[in-house]
Image (cartoon, grey):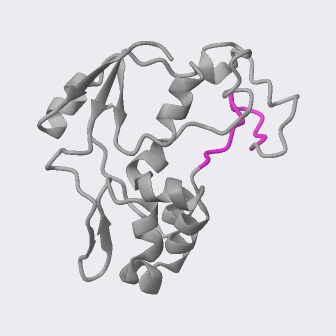
Amino acid sequence: MEAFTCARAETIDGAVGKGDGGRYLAGGTDLLTLMKRDIDTPERLVDLKRLPELDDRISDTGDSVEIGALATLAELERHPLIRASYPALAEAAAIAATPQLRNMATIGGNLLQRPRCWYFRSEQVTCWLRGGDTCYAREGENQHHALFQPSPCVAAHPSDPATALLALDAEVTVRGS
């Protein structure tokens, strides 16, 4: 693993400003794996876990639900409101990863995770997504990919909850680029 520094922001705007050359960290279940294999080598990690503006609340707003970016997949899987009103989301959270990872993984991080493509995650391959000029999955091993000809990369997004949120016409609020 490459050396890196850690930073803690006091606000979301401060975190966005510290993000240049770095990566954001809350649960870390995807990022730390990539860092251990030198696939992602950020110069800096920005801790989001203690930002007062981010939370893990799951709140009923009357006609919808608001889910904080730090809500874990385990919380989504078990939450009574999600199970009763949005069972597809509860089921998608329940099938994501292992119970241990669901206890750590946040919905924000899950939506931002990197592809599970074995070419992308290989230390020996520089695919298009890692700065190369070829998507090896297009002609190689690709049974878990999305083969759309105009795309420069055919890796499918790995988030199960993302599919459920899309089907539920969810909206995501993003700050920064």
Q: On the rendered structure, is 37 left or right of 140?
A: left
Task: Please tell me whether the stretch drawn in magenta is mainly helix, strand or loop.
Answer: loop
Q: Position of residue 109 (x, y in %)?
A: 42, 46
Instruction: Write down the quadrant of residue 157 in the picture.
Output: top right
Compared with 167, 130 (above or below) is: above
The magenta segment: 146-158
* 17 relative position to 162: left or right: left
In the displayed orientation, state which residue is furthest to the bottom. Answer: 84
Quarter of the rendering occupied by the C terminus: top left
Image coords of residue 4 (percent x, y): 36, 16
On screen, residue 18 versus residue 142, left or right, reads: left
The relative height of residue 155 versus residue 162 in the rendered view (above or below) is above
Kindly identify the residue that appears in the image at 34 percent across and 43 percent down. 26
Direction from residue 1 to residue 149 in the image, left or right = right
Q: Residue at x 23, y 56 (%)?
A: 55
Q: How many marks?
A: 0
Percent coordinates x, y for residue 132 in the rendering: 66, 13
Q: Is residue 72 above or below residue 12?
A: below
Tell me where residue 133 appears, x and y as whole percent: 70, 13
In this rendered view, identify the residue nearer to me: 129 or 69: 69
Instruction: Confirm whether the magenta stretch covers residue 67.
Output: no
The verdict on residue 155 being magenta is: yes
Residue at x 42%, y 53% (from the top left corner): 104
**Quarter holding residue 156:** top right
The quadrant holding residue 28 is top left
In front here: 174 or 72? 72
Identify the residue shown where x is 34% and y is 60%. 71
